[in-house]
Image: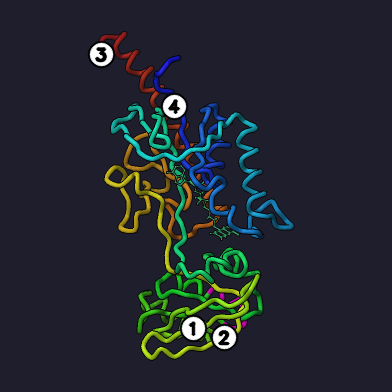
Amino acid sequence: MSDSIECIKCLIIGSGPAGYSAAIYAARADLKPVVYTGMEPGGQLTTTTEVDNYPGYPNGIDGPAMMMEFQQQAERFGTEVRIGMITEVELGKKPGDIHKACVDNAKWIEAETVIISTGATAKYLGLPSEQRLRGGGVSACAVCDGFFYKGQDVAIVGGGDTAAEEATYLANICRKVTMLVRRDEMRASKAMQHRVNACKNIDLRYNTEIDEVLGDQVVEGLRMVNNQTGEKETIAITGLFIAIGHKPNTDIFKGILDMDEAGYLITKGKSTKTNIPGVFAAGDVQDKEYRQAVTAAGTGCMAALDAERYLASLESSDVEDRAELKEGV
Ligand SMILES: Cc1cc2nc3c(=O)[nH]c(=O)nc-3n(C[C@H](O)[C@H](O)[C@H](O)COP(=O)(O)OP(=O)(O)OC[C@H]3O[C@@H](n4cnc5c(N)ncnc54)[C@H](O)[C@@H]3O)c2cc1C
């Protein structure tokens, strides 16, 4: 048995909409991609029951079923999907360098190009009642799930720009939005605070936290507690949105790839190129702005095209080098 390291053309880390879209394009370009799924095969959408806003599904679709279709489409063109976590990387520095990735702390694989699509994980408060009702009215994405609560009373937790943005988004759809801010002020920019304050149906509660999310199968209410006075209050709601931030899954790239202060990978201009030649980033891992399946899929496509063009540019510079050698330049 040979113990030589497998070397592939295109390694895709992550199996969400970005990873599988990259795989579809890379496979059709004959890059023979290998996708490592990570701990959440299919990505974040496998944690939601209904996806209503992905084009091509006029009646909506169940998140896990949609991601199964993404996988099947990628496999149809020859993508190899492997269960496994990339636990360490050694990325080359110069164009043409081979990159290395360690799978499950056990085996190394080499790749000419790497597409990183490891996503960003939504943070939750960690309350047992919140965790129990995830998918039953507790959501970390107002743009994704707000529509299901049209005309209803909901609550949102958080005081940053994202929370403010999502609160105003919900205020356009829902009857009333109770916004819980832990501190005595919001961290959001002044402009965002003005937008929140301008919404008549947002009931802003400072120094307020969740004591318990109420409901058996679905969210029926919320018990709030004022963290200054200890006073508790119960309100009836059908949806609870947690907007306290996301954590990009980039720990293994720290010190290797350029990232912002929150850990999102930085890509160059309008491309998916990272600071390392041959390494590309797609989806939520490089996008703290939109974080939607369709935008993740779009950048997945871009990453595969960028990878293909990168390999083609290496080949053409090889040809030029050889021609120059022949001519004795
Ligand atoms: C509850 C919920 C509902 C949502 N509903 C909608 C919706 O209705 N419509 C919509 O457009 N968007 C929705 N979103 C947002 C959407 O899910 C994300 O924008 C999208 O999944 C991002 O795709 P991605 O491919 O970038 O990352 P993800 O889907 O997060 O996938 C990341 C992948 O990377 C893998 N991974 C991570 N680290 C490693 C590693 N070290 N090695 C190997 N693999 C790794 C994970 O296992 C996973 O497969 C929702 C999100 C949530 C949480």
Q: Which portion, as a residue range, is magenta?
A: 169-176
Side of 90 relative to 270 (left or right) = left
Q: Residue at image x 51%, y 36%?
A: 35
Looking at mark 2, is its residue's CB closer than 8 Å to ligand 1? Answer: no
Task: Single out the mark in the foreground, 1 or 3.
Answer: 1
Residue 329, which numbered label?
3
- Type of amino acid at the residue the image marks with label 1: Met
Mark 4 is surrounded, within 10 Å at the Cα level, by few (under 14), some (14 to 19) or many (20 or more) other residues, namely few
Q: Where in the figure is residue 309, as x and y percent of width and height? A: 45, 32
Q: Where in the figure is residue 51, as x and y percent of width and height? A: 64, 58
In terms of sequence position, does the residue under pointer 2 or pointer 4 come before the other?
2
* Residue to which mark 2 is pinned: 235
Q: Residue at image x 40%, y 30%?
A: 107
Q: Count every numbered label the image shows and give the total.
A: 4
Residue 224, which numbered label?
1
Quarter of the image with the N terminus is: top left
Secondary structure state at the residue bearing disc 4: helix
Side of 277 relative to 287 (left or right) = left
Asked if marks 1 and 3 touch (Cβ < 8 Å), the reply is no
* Residue to which mark 4 is pinned: 312
- Type of amino acid at the residue the image marks with label 4: Ala
